[in-house]
Image (cartoon, grey):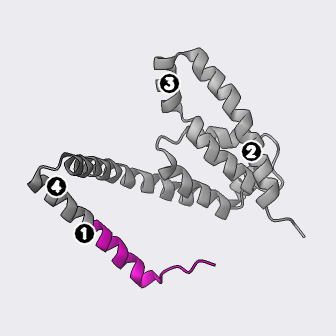
Amino acid sequence: MVKTAPKKQGWKLHLLIFCAFCVFAAVSFLAGYVPGMEMARNSTRFLVSMGALFPAAFIIIGLFEAWVDREVVEAHLGMNSHPCAYLWVFILASTIMAPLLVALPVASSLLKKGARLKLVLAFLGASTICRVPMTVFEAMYLGVPFSAVRLLVSIPLVILSSEILGRIFEPRGE
């Protein structure tokens, strides 16, 4: 069994790593070390883009938590849900604009509200392949036939894998 560090030491380690990276970046700029400068620029761009995405993502997740009742989730995605529940999962997943950054908290919320594990797993898979902006962009540059084939192959595989994983990991009603 692997021991994990206590919570108090975790933030110190993260702070130490962050400070070491900042020192490395500063020394790279002073010494003209190109790979270090590129790493610093890429990291800055990534932090700025995530900083712009986080507030909107947190607002959307908060609204989902507040507006969607547990009874609604249980009725459509719970233990007694209809096989058409996959349709609801794919519709919900297609509305997500951001990558898994938004899908993971929504999936956690779905689980807390009583959704079946297999449907949450299908939601996570669908959120990576069925996002509307990504599909439109793909169709523009790679063609509609390519997008159609990709979706027609990917969707059954997501459903099949979520069914298999759901049967393995879902708690039984014993």
Q: Earlier in the sequence, mark 4 or mark 2?
A: 4
Closer to the camera: disc 2 or disc 1? 1
Q: From the top left corner, tell me how far across and down residue 124 is, in percent.
A: 62, 48
Residue bearing mark 3: 138
Mark 4 crowd level (few <14, some 14–19, many ≥20, 10 Å Cα): some
Mark 1 crowd level (few <14, some 14–19, many ≥20, 10 Å Cα): few
Distance, label 2 to label 1, CA atoms, is 42 Å
Secondary structure state at the residue bearing disc 4: helix
Distance, label 4 to label 2, CA atoms, is 46 Å
Q: What amino acid is at disc 4? A: Ser
| Secondary structure mainly formed by the magenta segment | helix
**Residue found 64% across the figure and 78% down from its top:** 1
Closer to the camera: disc 4 or disc 2? 4
Closer to the camera: disc 4 or disc 3? 4
The answer to whether residue 75 of the structure is visible from this angle is no
Mark 2 crowd level (few <14, some 14–19, many ≥20, 10 Å Cα): some
Q: What residue range appears in magenta?
A: 1-18
Q: Are marks 1 and 4 in contact (CB under 8 Å)?
A: no
Residue bearing mark 4: 28
Q: Nearer the viewer, residue 152 or 108?
A: 152
Q: Earlier in the sequence, mark 4 or mark 3?
A: 4
Residue bearing mark 2: 161
Q: What amino acid is at disc 3? A: Glu
Q: What amino acid is at disc 2? A: Ser
Label for residue 19? Answer: 1
Q: Are marks 3 and 2 in contact (CB under 8 Å)?
A: no
